Image: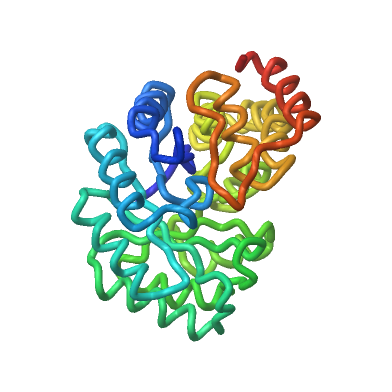
Amino acid sequence: MFQGSMVALVTPFKNGQVDEDGLRNLVEFHIANGTDVICPCGTTGESATLSFDEHHRVVDIVVKAAGGKVPVMAGTGSNNTEEAIELTQHAKKAGADGCLLITPYYNKPTQEGLYVHFKAIAEAVDIPLVLYNVPSRTSVNMEPATIARLAEIENVVGIKEASGLLSQVSEIVNLCGDDFDVISGDDVNTLPLLAVGGKGAISVTANIAPSKVSAMVHAFQDGNHDEARRLHHELLELHNSMFIQTNPIPVKAALAMMGKIAPEMRLPLTSMPEECNERLKKVLIKYSLI
């Protein structure tokens, strides 16, 4: 259901508030440059520091700006099941095409707890749901057997996999079948994930190089594996530069250098030191992005 090059969209801020015009401009930028799905209010969108009203407003703006030209998969996860249900209900009301649900962070639920959490959301809101497994952020790994149980629920349609374990990705694909969308959540592993049966990527790098990320994913999907491999290696340094500090610090710095947003994020995230900015600037110049 959700395939191709999907962007983990940043949330632009200006003077401490959501930059609504900047957000609309980013959506237009992605539509013009081949992004297949727009994913606001995820980790890269600094969802943890958005108020409920801001979260709702960002989803509203992105859905309206997308205008049905590309699907919107809104981040609606939480470590509080009732909060996740409320955010998911709003996303459906706003017109989102699906929702992205991170595994509960900090709580460290058991596998049974993960299953019951996502099942409760799926039963409460009839909208396509994509799970999000990122143990480095949440301190819990959702195991393939748990994912397979959840895949039996009709509106649980896929997973964003960022465990970094290709063996786990292969097991998920084997257990869940071709109708279940396994999506890369780690840019450097997108091509290997596609090779074992993945359907696309929810990409950080796509924020700054959407056409190139889209070209790589679609080359693979079109059977042009040599071209996909060439683009994978071409993008590698750019991918790595997006993680010289905690995401989304580098990607927001890059977008600011490109003149697309203000260089602003929310505490506890802070701007990069000058040496990191200079390092990032050199990479952006090399890729002709500035």
Compared with 286, 15 (above or below) is below
Q: In the image, residue 170 lies at what x, y percent? A: 61, 61
Residue 28 falls left or right of residue 271 = left
Viewer-closest of 13 and 289:
13
Rendering quarter of residue 234: top right
Compared with 121, 215 (above or below) is above
Q: Is residue 268 visible?
A: yes
Question: How many numbered badges does the structure rendering display?
Answer: 0
Rendering quarter of residue 242: top right
Compared with 188, 65 (above or below) is above
Q: Is residue 6 visible?
A: no
Rendering quarter of residue 52: bottom left
Which residue is painted at 48% across and 27% down in the image? 261
* Residue situated furthest right in the rendering: 275
Q: In the image, residue 103 lies at what x, y percent? A: 51, 68
Which residue is painted at 36% across and 68% down in the image? 84
* Residue situated furthest front in the rendering: 15
Viewer-closest of 233 and 32:
32
Q: In the image, residue 62 lies at what x, y percent? A: 31, 39
Viewer-closest of 235 and 38:
38
Viewer-closest of 90 and 277:
277
**Quadrant for the C terminus in the image:** top right
* Residue situated furthest left in the rendering: 93
Q: In the image, residue 38 lies at what x, y percent? A: 39, 40
Which residue is painted at 48% across and 39% down in the image? 10
Colouring: rainbow
